[in-house]
Amino acid sequence: MSTTPTTRRERVRLETAAEITTTARRLLVTHGPSAVTLRAIARDMGMTAPGLYRYVSSHEDLMDVLVSSLFDEVTAEMEAARDAAEPDVGSRMMAVCRAFRRWALANPAELALVFGSPVPGFAAAEEGPTEQAGRRFCGVFLALFVELWERRPFPVRADADIDPSFLAELRRWDPDGLGLPAGMLELFLRCWMRLYGAVTMEGFGQLGFAVSDAQPLFELELEAMSGLLGLGEGGASED
């Protein structure tokens, strides 16, 4: 079913909503997260505050819209990199990881907002836009992880070797109700910690004390991840 706006009012509403998000992002990049206020956006757009409230009901609503839009942007870049990579799942997985890093380094203010949560008082609503967009973001990597597992299962710990309380948490988590082995989920989290940690530490400037370019370190982390998943050199899998 087409979602193209059919009336001038609908088109104007969508254009205004997009301008609000663009203006909020510009304020974030130029002046920091504390500058992203409804008053500032209304002023920059030449609107009245009551007029802006027709589109966003509160500062929390504004941040939800902004953060979810940034999640969607990085997700789209990761998906594009995945689809442009070699067809084997390992190559697509490595392409997604590198795309995440590229976006992070190109957008440091946005990275800090989305992954550092520097806005006091903002917490994404459960099942709200930010929560859903975050799941889509993480789902790009998880889907490839599951695909690799289904094609060529990699070694994981047996349930008996996992701490019982941790095992119970893994079983409760069970993303998307796929019924995946607990050891597989544990390894997914280990790989996710490597990726997320490497990207955010570099993106937040926390490696500058040692290196000016952390790409070699990042590639070493991808190599270590590939080893955990039984992938070949460069992350290629033998599909």
Image: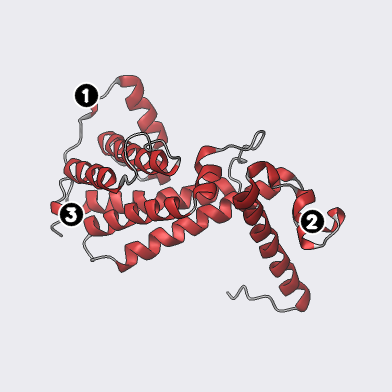
| Numbered circles on residues, count | 3
Quadrant where the C terminus is found in the figure? bottom left
Examine the rendered structure and indicate whether residue 188 appears above or below residue 232. Answer: above
Coloring basis for residues:
secondary structure
Q: Position of residue 177 (x, y in %)?
A: 40, 44
Q: Position of residue 62 (x, y in %)?
A: 69, 49
- Identity of the amino acid at label 3? Gly
Residue at 37 percent of width and 34 percent of height: 209
**Residues marked 1 and 3 touching at CB (< 8 Å):** no
Q: Which disc, if any, is residue 160?
A: 1
Foreground pick, 187 / 80: 80
Relative horizontal placement of residue 235, taking residue 207 as reference (left or right): left
**In this rendering, the label closer to the viewer, 1 or 2:** 2
- Identity of the amino acid at label 2? Ala
Relative horizontal placement of residue 200, taking residue 52 as reference (left or right): left
Residue at 46 percent of width and 56 percent of height: 74
Around disc 2, counting alpha carbons within 10 Å, would you say few (fewer than 14), some (14 to 19), or many (20 or more)? some
Q: Which disc, if any, is residue 70?
A: none
For numbered disc 3, what is the local secondary structure? helix
Examine the rendered structure and indicate whether residue 65 appears above or below residue 85. Answer: above
- Identity of the amino acid at label 1? Ala
Gap in Å between the C-alphas at discs 1 and 3?
33 Å
Residue at 66 percent of width and 52 percent of height: 27
Foreground pick, 71 / 181: 71
Foreground pick, 53 / 108: 108
Q: Position of residue 135 (x, y in %)?
A: 47, 48
- Residue, disc 2: 42
- Residue, disc 3: 234
